[in-house]
């Protein structure tokens, strides 16, 4: 087990001060489900300080405002999956959070950790992207709120997203997430394919959110998980689907466009022989369900 | 090696001592407190053999740093029952032959206990979900499922 000094700051201000002070030598730890195993395998090279944020009250809580819902980064996947507000307003996020790891892991792992770690296979991310989530970030120098998509792209550009650079410790702390309210009668679904039902890391996942007015799609989000280096909305596919009715032909074409866009973004990977037909099948299945749910 | 003070209530007893910073909760339970009922299987949160209850919720004690559990309340298999009076889930495991090699049993018992504390009359699906993070390599899931079902009918469990 890698050795380190364990620091327990008492406030958000103290957390960002420690992050500033120790820079690349420190790691923020919340649930610990990624970091403790990495420490055990001596994978956190150069890390000598751990900044424990597990119980920081400012990173906890779920609260409604006029235009949306705030979720503290320190909320665990279990707490999110059990929250009456999230169940009623954003069942898509409940679906994603309740399929992560096992009960034991969901009781520890936090939403902030899942996003800050930014694994392409992180299950919460496709759901949060569909919900137009904003991320609030804080450092000693600034506070800002940006779209989750921008946050993920910035992280990728900084060359992180690997286990050696877990979480957003080098610069900014993820304080929490803002989810704007969805339109009434929005349909949404998260599907995950993994080696087994519990515990397994996603081979592939899919989140789709759809709103129709008089049968015509007027709002759509489509995000495959564990397929792209940076998880992202398939905007071209969304544009194709907008303004159309969910006919069999449209559903078929949507799934084909999605696989084409994925291949265009990443090139053809060896896993795609399996993943591409599965992605197409899942998209067709979910859209068909939405269509039948009228 | 640097040490820090940790204060944790384990099975109702307050433990307050200096520990090495890099210890995980399972290390403290097994090596410092000699509570060896909790097992370490995979060490990476896959198998659930190390499951304990921390502040009312099941966790993999191999993924929790002991210092991050500071101030917490931990329940391990040793705190479930006594030799004279077993906990209803322990009795049900015995009655339903839900133990073969026994390595997964402490973790299974803790997952079952936490489930029944929260939901005294779970459905079969809810039981399966509750133990989905606990692997049994002797393939005794059917008996374990039956045992938890049986325990849920026990009056002590129903009274919480």
Image (spheres, coloured by chain):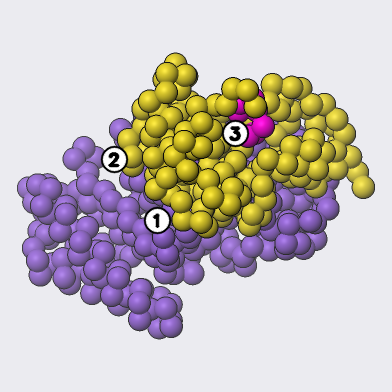
Chain colours: A purple, B yellow
Residue found at the very far top of the displayed protein: B159
3D distance between C-alphas at marks 1 and 2: 29 Å
Q: Chain of mark 3?
A: B
Q: Secondary structure at mark 1?
A: loop
Q: Chain of mark 1?
A: A
The answer to whether A282 appears left or right of B84 in the picture is left
Task: Classify residue A54 by image quadrant.
Answer: top right
What residue does disc 1 label? A197
**Is the Cβ of the residue at disc 1 closer than 8 Å to that at disc 3?**
no
Tell me the residue at 54%/37% (across/down). B109
Nearer-N-terminus badge (1/2): 2
Query: Counting other residues with Cα less than 10 Å from the Cα at mark 1, is it few (<14), some (14-19), or many (20 or more)?
Result: some
Q: Can see residue A177?
A: no
Q: Are marks 1 and 3 on the same chain?
A: no
Residues A23 and A36: in front is: A36
Which residues fall within the magenta stretch?
Answer: B76-82
Q: Say the numbered circle drawn on residue A182.
A: 2
3D distance between C-alphas at marks 2 and 3: 36 Å
Q: Can see residue B97?
A: yes
What residue does disc 3 label? B53
Q: Secondary structure at mark 3?
A: strand
Above-or-below relation of A294 to A15: below
Residues A247 and B98: in front is: B98
Give residue A118's position: percent from left, percent from top: 54, 57
Above-or-below relation of A167 to A285: above
């Amino acid at each position: 087990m890698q050795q380190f000094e364990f620091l327990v700051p008492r406030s958000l201000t103290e957390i960002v001060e420690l992050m500033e002070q120790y820079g690349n030598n420190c790691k923020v730890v919340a649930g610990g489900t990624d970091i403790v195993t990495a420490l055990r395998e001596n994978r956190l090279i150069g890390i000598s300080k751990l900044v424990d944020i597990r119980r920081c009250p400012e990173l906890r809580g779920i609260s409604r405002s006029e235009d949306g819902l705030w979720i503290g980064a320190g909320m665990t996947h279990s707490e999110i999956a059990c929250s009456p507000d999230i169940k009623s307003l954003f069942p898509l996020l409940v679906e994603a959070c309740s399929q992560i790891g096992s009960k034991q892991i969901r009781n520890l792992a936090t939403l902030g950790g899942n996003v800050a770690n930014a694994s392409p296979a992180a299950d919460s991310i496709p759901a949060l992207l569909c919900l137009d989530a904003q991320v609030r970030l804080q450092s000693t120098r600034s506070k800002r709120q940006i779209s989750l998509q921008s946050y993920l792209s910035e992280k990728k550009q900084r060359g992180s997203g690997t286990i050696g650079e877990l979480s957003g410790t080098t610069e900014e702390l993820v304080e929490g997430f803002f989810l704007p309210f969805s339109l009434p009668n929005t349909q949404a679904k998260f599907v995950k394919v993994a080696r087994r039902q519990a515990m397994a890391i996603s081979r592939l996942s899919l989140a789709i959110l759809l709103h129709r007015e008089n049968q015509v799609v007027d709002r759509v989000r489509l995000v495959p998980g564990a397929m792209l280096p940076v998880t992202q909305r398939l905007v071209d596919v969304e544009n194709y689907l907008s303004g159309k009715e969910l006919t069999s032909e449209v559903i078929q074409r949507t799934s084909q466009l999605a696989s084409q866009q994925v291949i265009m973004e990443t090139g053809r990977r060896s896993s795609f022989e399996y993943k591409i037909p599965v992605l197409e099948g899942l998209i067709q299945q979910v859209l068909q369900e939405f269509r039948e749910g009228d | 090696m640097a040490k820090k003070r940790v204060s944790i209530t384990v099975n109702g007893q307050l433990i307050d001592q200096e520990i090495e910073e890099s210890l995980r909760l399972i290390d403290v339970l097994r090596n410092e407190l000699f509570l060896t009922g909790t097992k370490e299987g995979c060490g990476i949160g896959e198998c659930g053999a190390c499951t304990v209850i921390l502040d009312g919720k099941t966790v993999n004690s191999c993924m929790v740093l002991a210092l991050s559990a500071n101030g917490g309340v931990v329940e391990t298999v040793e705190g479930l029952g006594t030799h004279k009076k077993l906990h209803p889930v322990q009795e049900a495991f015995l009655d339903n032959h839900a133990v073969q090699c026994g390595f997964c049993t402490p973790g299974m018992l803790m997952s079952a206990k936490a489930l029944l504390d929260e939901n005294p009359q779970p459905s079969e699906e809810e039981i399966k979900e509750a133990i989905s993070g606990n692997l049994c390599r002797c393939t005794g899931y059917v008996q374990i499922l039956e045992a938890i079902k049986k325990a849920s009918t026990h009056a002590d469990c129903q009274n919480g």
